Amino acid sequence: MSGPKDLDPSSSPRALLGAELRHARERKGLSQAELGEPLFVSGSFIGQLEAGTRRMQLEYAVQIDEILGTGGFLARNCQALAKSKYPDHFAEAAEAEAIATAIREYSQLLIPGLLQTKAYAEAVFRAYQPTAPDAKIDDLVAARLERVHLLDDPTTPLLWVILDEAVLRREVGDRTVMAEALRHVSSLARRRRIIVQVLPFTAGAHASMEGSLKLMEFEDAPPLSFVEAPDMGKLLDDPATVARHTLMFSLLQAAALSPQKSLVLIESVAQDYGHGVQHP
């Protein structure tokens, strides 16, 4: 019997690779937990690889090929799929985000990527990489704006964003850029495409003082949380950790302004920027 054909990375590559992994595991008569045990990962992690919500890493692909006797198939295709337009620390999260049914995000310092305008994204990347050539910045902005098309669908994914008030007050680019960026967020909320809340300074200490937070839910796989630091990011699938982060987001929702009051504040600040008012 001939082995499976190498995948075409342009055609839902992670889902196809995950399906081949599932077929090979079932042919071997192993459960997800049994396959995960020699890899020191959970059965749910294997399930996420099979569902395509997580990227197959080469180190796992090599070991799985050996365990399942797939003749290097997973490793070969894993290397082909490793190319990404996103930075290494964010690539896996961006790919998971693209198939999520719900995304809940608390942003501490800047407008989240899915809600950014071109001018705002360009100002962010230029601040990150002040000596980068224009072509590099253009590529980064293009990749970010491509993610925005996730919101072209009128209902999926559900996107619930909590913005720290600092996001509104920090002038990224200039006042014109900020006015446009906040009006864009407001427009998405008024079209009922997103739910947005603002966590005001008056809320004081809160559940996510140490950083931003992103939670993702999927139709056929367990939820994930994503935490990020400069040039670092990690997807987490440990049920206890995800549950704790879910509680943190719930506490942030409770401490934030209502969606209606949040929208009033966002539009007020946008109007101030449009009139040239400087925010502290």
Image (cartoon, rainbow, N blue to C red):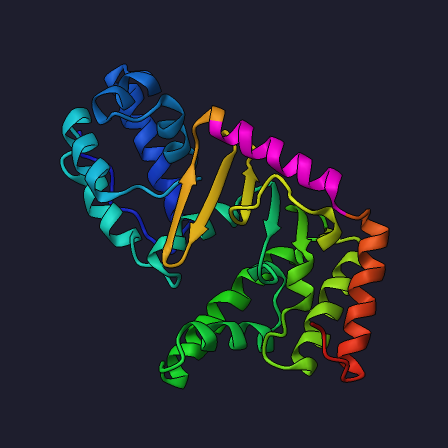
Residue 42, placed above or below residue 4: above
The relative height of residue 172 versus residue 253 in the rendered view (above or below) is below
Instruction: Tell me which residue sits at (46%, 78%) in the image.
Output: 126
Judge from the rendering whether residue 184 lies leftward or rightward of residue 119; answer left or right. Answer: right
Q: Residue at x 76, y 84 (%)?
A: 276
Position in image of residue 258 (x %, y %)? 82, 47
Residue at 63% x, 69% y is: 170
- Could you say which quadrant of the image residue 181 lies in? bottom right
Q: How many marks?
A: 0
Residue occupying the point 59% across, 79% down: 173
Q: Which residues are magenta?
A: 241-256
Q: Picture coordinates of residue 7 (x, y %)? A: 30, 47
Q: In this rendering, would 126 be left or right of 43?
A: right
Q: Is residue 129 visible?
A: yes
The quadrant of the image that shows the N terminus is top left
Does the stretch in magenta take in 248? yes
Magenta stretch: includes residue 254: yes
Q: Position of residue 57 (x, y in %)?
A: 27, 43
> Relative to 149, is 217 above or below?
above
Q: Is residue 276 left or right of residue 24?
A: right
Q: Quadrant of the C terminus?
A: bottom right
* Magenta portion: prevailing SS class: helix
User: Between 196 and 23, which is closer to the camera in this rendering?
Assistant: 196
Q: Quadrant of residue 269?
A: bottom right
Closer to the camera in the image, 52 or 109: 109
Image location of residue 247, percent across then percent down:
61, 31
* Quadrant in the picture for residue 230: bottom left
Please say whether residue 220 is visible from this viewpoint: no
